[in-house]
Image: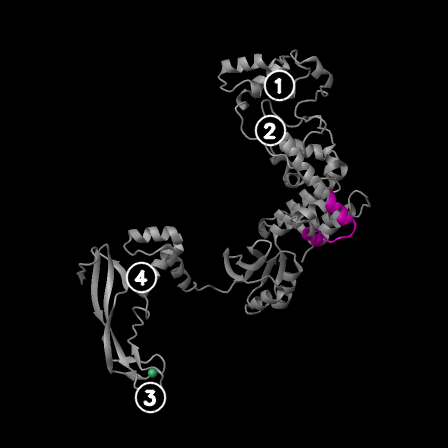
Amino acid sequence: MQITPEVPDCLHIAAHGTRPGGRCPDCGRASRAVHSRYLRRPADLPSLGRKVRVGLRVRRFYCRNAACKRRTFAERLPDLVKPHARRTYRLAEAQGRVGVALGGEAGARLLHRLAMPASADTVLRLIRRLPLPEQDAPRIVGVDDWAMRKGRTYGTIVVDLERRCVVELLPDRTAVTVAAWLQQRPEIEVVARDRSTEYARAAAIGAPKAVQVADRWHLLSNVRAMLERWLARAHARLRRLPVPPGGDGRQLGQRTHAYHRSAADDAASADSRARWLAAYEDVRRRYLAGEKLLTISRSTGLARATVRKYACADSFPERAVRPPGRSNLDPYLAHLEARLAEGCEDAMALWREMRALGHAGGPKMVQRWVAEHRTAPARSTAHKWLQRAPAVTPPGTTPGRPAALPSPKQLAWLLVQPPTALPPLDAAAVTRVEQDKEAAMVASLARRFTALVRLCGIAQTSRPATPLATFDAWLTEARRVGSVPSKRSPPVWSRTVLRCGPP
Ligand SMILES: [Zn+2]
């Protein structure tokens, strides 16, 4: 062993094969006839904190088999290094293991420190060459689809639910592929899946003895999707509901909407709304004329989810109300509101007070805020504007539009939560929506279903009561609600129930 002068910090180990001869890799005939020798320099595991290169003197033998096409072959060293490889087996494994723990880039950085450098791409390649770990056959598996390219190409992921690890990625999501995979594993006892007919068929063909279970995530996701569709249909009606007597859940100094923006921003926003409204009307017209959702999506260029949302909605789904961002005015809101309540509507006077309290901004935003909240026109307002002044509206509302309500998607999420777990603003929105009798009924059904599904997740021994009887009662009621004939809302629940039924 010596330090090579041309590569400092690198140990050089001279080595050669000791077997008397070799075997031809093509015909297998042994040979001792040496044709030539040459030097290989594969990298090896580091030693004494230095990189190691093996100076390997390799022999080339003649193949004496007349029937063999190969004339010469190089000596094989199956315990040390692959033919043509630039690193020994043990170094490749060590680098691959580091990659498994850290990934490509981080692995490459650490390997450089450990005196066995490799690029990030090489680390990834070495990971792929490592043998897969030995695993016991899975007993309980979950199957679902995953997107290689969302909206285009989907595969199937199979997860071992006991060990919580992925056991297989299949190239598509057809019943044939999944069934073939299941058929090779007769020890599978339970298949958890979504409720697509394709996976149901796959499990029925591939693992006919296994119990099929609709997994909880999909049950909860479906109930929320159904709720969202129902809300999208009823949203226009729900928006007209008044704010309940208890208030909108807003605390002093808390904002529910963004500050008023400039006229140019408002105009841009109105333009955008008009474009989406036109798109909505187009989709509705085509849908009611009997066109299919996919056809509408292709001819209008709208996403399929948007087309479906528009087709189901009785009225134009307004943009979701986003929580307001931070503003320099926020720390002074409580002061402003208190002064407004005392009757002070002079924006400049308020701004001077705020400046004394430490506010660093100009008077413009205070003027805008006061303009939104004042109960009477300012004294300085010119006579000509007074005549066109719009009716003054209560705080928190925009002129001409009812108080904002969360979007169907946001509401669907709020309605399945336990009411006690909601912050005051959200709880107030739920209370407002539940003034509608049908909405209250639908929300109650969704909440009970969610609680039931969560109950099923508790271990059987500690479960308070058998949920099956509760489920049957729920099912009966849901069917009754779903079958209420109503022009406004087609029987959403019957569909939900049918899709939520036990597998
Ligand atoms: Zn040969």
Which of these two is toward me, 301 or 7?
Answer: 301
Quote the CA–CA distance across marks 2 and 3.
88 Å
Tell me which label, 4 or 2, sits earlier in the chain: 4
Q: Quadrant of residue 93?
A: bottom left
Q: Amino acid at mark 2?
A: Ala
Q: Amino acid at mark 3?
A: Ala
Q: Residue furthest bottom?
A: 66
Tell me the magenta residue range: 281-298
Q: Which mark is residue 258?
A: 2
- Tell me where residue 289 appears, x and y as whole percent: 79, 50
Quote the CA–CA distance across marks 1 and 2.
14 Å
Quote the CA–CA distance across marks 1 and 3.
102 Å
Residue linked to disc 3: 66
| Label 3 lies in ligand 1 vicinity (Cβ under 8 Å) | no
Q: Amino acid at mark 4?
A: Leu
Q: Are marks 1 and 2 in contact (CB under 8 Å)?
A: no
Tell me which label, 1 or 4, sits earlier in the chain: 4
Q: Secondary structure at mark 1?
A: helix
Q: Secondary structure at mark 2?
A: loop
- Tell me where residue 324 appears, x and y as whole percent: 58, 30
One can see residue 500 in this view: no
Q: What secondary structure characterizes most of the magenta part? A: helix
Q: Are marks 2 and 3 in contact (CB under 8 Å)?
A: no
Callout in the foreground (2, 3):
3
